[in-house]
Image (tube, coloured by chain):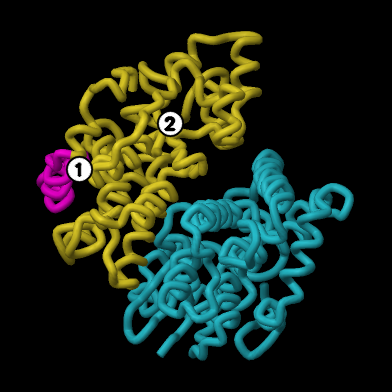
Chain colours: A yellow, B cyan
Amino acid sequence: MLELYHAGLTACSKKSRIVLKEKGLDYVSHYVSLSDFEHHDPDYLKLNPNGLVPTLVHDGAVIIESTVINEYLDEVFPEVSLRPADPVARAKVRVWAKLADEALGPNMIVTFSNAGGIGKSARSLEGDDLEALIERIPLMERRAVITKITKGGGFSEAEFAAAREKAGFIVDKAEAALTDGPYLAGDSYSLADINMVPFMHRYRQRVVPDKVTPEKAPRVCEWLDRILDRPAVIDTFAISDETRPED
Amino acid sequence: MLELYHAGLTACSKKSRIVLKEKGLDYVSHYVSLSDFEHHDPDYLKLNPNGLVPTLVHDGAVIIESTVINEYLDEVFPEVSLRPADPVARAKVRVWAKLADEALGPNMIVTFSNAGGIGKSARSLEGDDLEALIERIPLMERRAVITKITKGGGFSEAEFAAAREKAGFIVDKAEAALTDGPYLAGDSYSLADINMVPFMHRYRQRVVPDKVTPEKAPRVCEWLDRILDRPAVIDTFAISDETRPED
């Protein structure tokens, strides 16, 4: 039995939901509302002490970190393979997985600063409620983000600029990689594409829309549209009983 | 044929040197001097466009990122296995590998701020030489560190405090993990231990020596001494013809 604790349309949750759907695996979906700070609930922290989503539970075994969950799923359910057999190509997939982990930063700075979702919920708190919220956040990096957008005056223009520079760097890396083949890690669709697509989608939509254009990044735009058109990705990105429209 | 481009006694270079030695693999060692900024040389950037060490070249195929190099080596040379066969345990190894990647930050802030190595070299430059150095650094995060320790007045007390908090968090995670077994990912020595040992060694030596004590982290201290006593780790940490004493 597979269970996924996730926050629907957030980037890291999408990463693992895509893999489950590409492989046609049945799973129990547990929605964890970030706006209601359910990822900081004591019961959830027993599963995932870092207070992050997603978390996979497979026959009682708990796997955390979307990148690690995705490689786990590909090892345990290899029928629909999402990693190349060649170790050199597989290393390329892992370099992309690492870059997808780094891609979260710019996405979060811009998304959490927006009007909706967890940013809005956090900003609606004050006084002791806000202090209690911040106190409960296990990871110092996340605590710093929530502190910044509530009582820290928000991110500075220099921090937004650094986030956009990082996003632009990743777009440029993808554009260069796609000269070598139709997918980020070469010839075949893989975890490299899956781990990156939620971030690249947000980069085009919200973070660096001026960089992800057919003029400046034609290969990335074509790749993004092609990946977004896969049935598993369409299902993952759609409003459904697995999601809420909050993000 | 295996070739490793590395900077000897720096943490990420140690990670991959340990794996090569544990497996008894012959390799050609290419020392890349960070103090001389050889990792920013155009020829090296052809191999590793990020300008980081180490880089592995295996029969002409280039693999970057120490974490990725180490999993590659374990896939291609599985005789001495450094990952458990069970996928759940293997996922734990990968969570540790990810944490080792995060462990670099605190290590770098404290180490680069010290008197020796790349920090000293960078601080000895000024004017156009310094601008040219900064201009050549491919990754914005590394550019930011060098800018900060040269013309940015160094890291602030708040930044040092954040680095120490992060290091302390990792020490606490390790102490907790070692209640489950003698190694970080459970029963067997693995890439989890190898990827973490260079950082934990520096944490005890330099970053959070007050946290890595037999009183506060007894399991971590015992683990650290035990791992540092392995022949492959002794060889890796020693001054040898593969290293220079600069770091």
Q: Where is residue A203 in the image (x, y as percent from the top left)?
A: 27, 38
The amino acid on which the numbered mark 2 sits, given as a three-letter code, is Tyr
Residues B39 and B25: in front is B25
Residue B12 horizontal side relative to residue A243, left or right: right
User: Quadrant location of residue B245?
Assistant: bottom right
Q: Which residue appears at 72% of the width and 53% of the height?
A: B178
Residue B18 horizontal side relative to residue A117, left or right: right
CA distance separating discs 1 and 2: 31 Å
Residues rendered magenta in the picture: A210-231
Which residue is label 2 attached to? A5
Q: Is A16 inside the magenta-drawn segment?
A: no
- The tag on residue B41 is none
Residues A147 and B215: in front is B215
Chain under disc 2: A
- Both labels 1 and 2 in a single chain: yes
Q: Where is residue A12 in the image (x, y as percent from the top left)?
A: 38, 38
Report the quarter where the N terminus of chain B lies: bottom left
Q: Position of residue B192 (x, y in %)?
A: 59, 61
Q: Which residue appears at 79% of the width and 55% of the height?
A: B219
The amino acid on which the numbered mark 1 sits, given as a three-letter code, is Val
For label 2, the SS is strand
Q: In this view, does A29 lie above or below B104?
A: above
Q: Which residue appears at 76% of the width and 75% of the height?
A: B229
Which residue is label 1 attached to? A212
Q: Is residue B26 above or below residue A110?
A: below
Residue lying furthest right:
B215
Q: Where is residue A213 in the image (x, y as percent from the top left)?
A: 15, 42
Regarding residue A161, the answer to whether it shows in the image is: no
Q: In this view, does B26 lie above or below B71?
A: below
